[in-house]
Structures are given as C-alpha cells and as structure tokens.
Image (cartoon, helix red, strand yellow):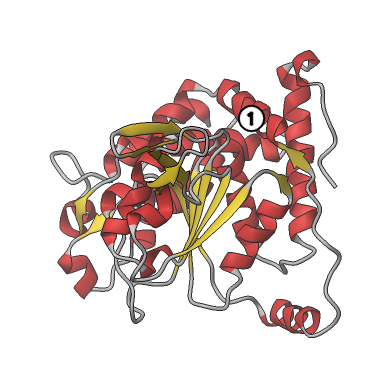
Amino acid sequence: MTAPAIDLDHLDDAALADRLQGAGQRIAAELRKVIVGQDAVVEQALIALFAGGNCLLVGVPGLAKTLLISTLARALDLKFSRIQFTPDLMPSDVTGTDVIQDDPATGQRRLAFMPGPVFANVLLADEINRTPPKTQAALLEAMQERRVTVQGRTYELDKPFFVFATQNPIELEGTYPLPEAQLDRFMLEVMLDYLPEEDEVAVVKATTALPPDAVQPVVSKAEILAYQRVVRRLPIADAVTRYAVKLVRTSRPGDGAPDYVKQFVSYGASVRAAQALVLGAKARALLQGRASPSFDDVKALARPVLRHRVLVNFQAQSEKVTTDALVNRLIETVGVPRSAL
C-alpha cells in the first residue's frame, strides 16, 4: 500500500499547511500502533522530518529508539536503510566503494561504483556511537550537503534525505563519543527516559500479545518535499528570530556572557543552532495548526537544539552541571522582548 497521490501544483501555502498538520497526525497515528507514550519524542521526530533536519535519539538500551525510527520510516513512502554501527565498520561500508567488474560487451574490466546504505531517503544509524570517529565521519558530507564523495567523485543523494541516529549514553561500555562537527549536524538531540508505570504496563501487555496492525505508508515523497518548502516559506516575526539568535549567542563564553556561562561552558552553540531553532519553531507551529511561530515554540525546542551543541568544561562535569540545566538558565536569562508581551 502506498500513500495516496496529491496534486501539489494546485495547492497554495495555506492548503499545504493544513495538509502538513494532517500528515503529522496520520504519521503519529501509525506510530501509536507500536509506540506507547513518548509523545514529546514523537513530536520532536516529526519536527525534524518536516524541517528537513537530522535527529539523534539518546537513551539507555530498551527504550524503543530503533523501533521508533523504523516505524516512522514505514509510515513514509520512502526508501529506508539501516546501518548497525559496530567497532569494525569501515567508511566504505557506509558510503559505498568502487569495485572491479567485467564488461560482458567488451570483455574488459572497469571500475563501477557500488552505492552503500547511505543512498536512501531515511537512514537509520543504529547505535552510532558504537563505531570509531573515522567511520562516524563518513556521514558528515551526507548529513550537511546531501551528497557523498568517493575516490574523488561526488554522488548526489536522493531528496529528501534524513539521518535518524540512535545512541547509548557515552558512559556505557564499548562506545565512542561523537565528534563535535558531527553532533552539530544533528538538528535535534532527543532524550528518551523510562516510561511512567502505566505506560510501561501497556508496553508489556502489547508486546506479549498478538502483533499490532501493520504500519502503513501515509505520506509520499512529493508531499514531504512540499511540506519542507512550506515550512521554510512560513513567515516568522523578527522578534522571534532575534530571540532565537540571542539564546544561542548567550550560550557562548566571552565578553558580556553571564557568569554561569563563563564558569561552566567551554564552547557555545553555533549558528546552526539558531537556524535549527527558527526552522523547528516553524515546523512546530504548523504541526499544531498555527500560522505564526511563537516564543514558546523556540523555548520548547531550546533543550533538544542546544543540549548537544553547548560543550561544558571540567568544572561543570565535576559539579555535575548538565547542559539541560544550563539551557534552562539561558531561557531564564534571555527574556522575551517587552514589546512582544
């Protein structure tokens, strides 16, 4: 079963915005066939999807990180690929490589490129921190430029392209920290925690009974690309954009930074963080049926956007000051402009 066709050329932005909200609801309904609770996680995954960003899901084993992403992929009429990251994985296992093949017409041998699993629309990088940084870095160009370079030749990836990665906390055995350059390419870092007791009971009942109804694709490739365009075209108030930028700039230690930032932060967030806040605010507003992103949208995304981009120093680690705690203080420090109240 494939997603129903839609004539996108005859729809204006208002109609596309309405359809985006409906598409988000349909995808969420498919996810809830398998996923219990985790509403905030599902919302953030949908925001990354419609904003065209990559998403990193972090949590201890057994919290359905992989199941969530694979189910999301089944709800989309897109090509899906999964890589199980292991310590012996090589960069060519991700991107692909040139192989020697015999040409049956000429009898001569020639090099032919064999695409790797990165050539998909939705790539699940499962347990991405189980492989060394050399292999992790094979995704850098794909995540940012949506292309891959192998042996000096560049190959474009099909659009849309997303990397949804899972990661166990770095203090567990057999893991490698992700390079900062790669972390910055994830639009959101989504934290999964243990479910409330009633939700956990529901999970146990569901997974020890008959399998749920099959997840069906409900959104097509053409729709997703159209929704991503309408997200970028959505107007946003200058004050909201400036608020997002100020949050990011305040996270950087230096002259004029708050004392707690100078005390606990080694490096603040990059410009990509402000871009992610604005795009995410637009997508969140449309998913909730609103045509104007608000300060609350930016605040709601501050933690998943900034927590992996603000690098704390040794003093913060020794005093167990988390990045989430610092982001909470940033939200308190950077007030909403009075003119917007």
Q: Is residue 269 above or below residue 192?
A: above
Q: Quadrant of residue 275?
A: top left
Task: Where is residue 306? Give x, y as percent.
Answer: 38, 49
Task: Where is residue 43? Give x, y as percent.
Answer: 64, 51
Q: Specify whether 62 is left or right of 8.
A: left
Task: Where is residue 60? Give x, y as percent.
Answer: 48, 76
Question: Which residue is painted at 34% across and 70% down in the image?
Answer: 88
Q: Is residue 16 above or below residue 196?
A: above
Question: Which residue is painted at 54% across and 72% down in the image?
Answer: 193
Circle 1 crowding by C-alpha within 10 Å: few under 14, some 14–19, many from 20:
some
Q: Is 283 or 86 nearer to us in this picture? A: 86
Residue 192 in sight in this render: yes
Task: Where is residue 271? Give x, y as percent.
Answer: 32, 35
Callout count: 1
Q: Quadrant of residue 196?
A: bottom right
Residue 294 in sight in this render: no
Going by the numbered disc 1, the residue's amino acid type is: Leu
Q: Specify whether 21 is left or right of 172.
A: right
Q: Specify whether 294 is left or right of 260.
A: right
Question: Which residue is painted at 76% across and 21% down in the image?
Answer: 8
Disc 1 marks which residue? 225
Q: Is residue 104 above or below residue 12?
A: below
Q: Is 321 or 202 nearer to us in this picture? A: 202
Q: Specify whether 2 is left or right of 44.
A: right
* Mark 1, secondary structure of its residue: helix
Q: Is residue 220 above or below residue 31?
A: above
